Image: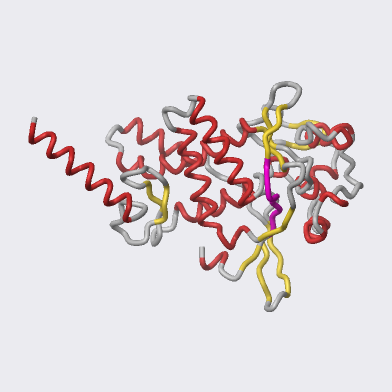
Amino acid sequence: MNNLFQSASAQWARYSEYEYRQGGDGTLYLMPAQNAQSAVYNPLQNAEAMVIDALNIGLLCMSGNATTKKMQTKIQDEIRAFAGKYGLLGFMTALPTTPEFLNYDVAYLPKNRYLKAESMPSDEYAAMFFPFDDEVNKNPNPKKYYMGDDGAIRVSLAARDKPKAIEMSYGKGYAEPYDWLFTQFKDWAFIFCASFMYYEESDPLMAELHRKAISVFDGNVPTYHIELFDKPTLVWDFHSLLLMVQMIFSLMLTDGSRPLRSCKHCSRAFVVGHPNAAFCGAKCKNQFNVYKSRNKKKQDAD
């Protein structure tokens, strides 16, 4: 992590507030709220916290009561809060083979969880992410500048250096299906669980299942360039926040010095501070010991 991202930078856009809106076909979308303010930030400054937040949302999605109304509301609130901290995942540019797909007639889509088509017309693909913006939905023009008054000056300037599709995804009309977001967070949590359950599994068939699950976890490699700030700085050109989370997660998952672990009490993901750590904090450790002591006393009484 330090070798690759210390003194490095990256850019992504986020809004101060997000809301859910339901499309005409019943699909639920997450998108910037009407009066939300936009900003550009460097996700690498809090990359580990971003991954931990993503994993803990995914663990909620994997929980046995994830289908109850109360938990569904909690998960929706957590995903909206995640977007408020880090922005949307950028599915529009994460799925195609290139973020420059609007420069071509067809967008090519490698195998993924969300779309079965291997390719589709570029304008039709882009339009999927603007269900409430009739202008973009009918004609996603790759030659048009979309930010305009929709974004702050810094966001507009940052968008000008990006592929057209990224510029469009920075706009207020860009929306992502909630079901896709739910599935992506859940998939990350599944990979996280498989990474440590493999070493604890006594059943060879289940161990093989975990191994295969990890083997299909991959992603596109970002490009980079050098910029002259107060000193020469390595700038990573991530074309989606999804790719950024995926890459940082991969590095954290394979970091032997500061591994990821699941808290023995609350089951939340955390970064291990020392090799024998089993709890995410002192509070969980104390509660675990209290409950363990109570259960022992109850068993002795019985």
Coordinates of residue 118 in the picture (x, y in percent): 71, 31
Seen at 14% across and 39% down, the residue is 296
Coordinates of residue 188 in the picture (x, y in percent): 51, 41
Q: How is the image coloured?
A: secondary structure
Q: Is residue 49 above or below residue 265?
A: below
In this picture, residue 289 sits left or right of residue 69: left
**Between 267 and 20, the one nearer to me in the picture:** 20
Q: Kindly give the residue lying farthest to the front in the view shown.
A: 35
Q: Which residues are magenta?
A: 11-18
Instruction: Give the image quarter of residue 192.
Output: top left
Q: Is residue 16 magenta?
A: yes
Q: Kindly give the residue lying farthest to the left in the view shown.
A: 301
Q: Is residue 56 above or below residue 73?
A: below
**Between 157 and 152, the one nearer to me in the picture:** 152
In this picture, residue 205 sits left or right of residue 119: left
In this picture, residue 177 sits left or right of residue 121: left
Seen at 22% across and 48% down, the residue is 289
Coordinates of residue 302 in the picture (x, y in percent): 8, 30
How many labels sit on residues?
Answer: 0
Seen at 35% across and 40% down, the residue is 197
Q: Kindly give the residue lying farthest to the top in the view shown.
A: 25
Coordinates of residue 205 in the picture (x, y in percent): 34, 30
Seen at 71% across and 36% down, the residue is 109
Q: Is residue 58 above or below residue 270?
A: above
In this picture, residue 26 sits left or right of residue 294: right
Q: Is residue 103 magenta?
A: no
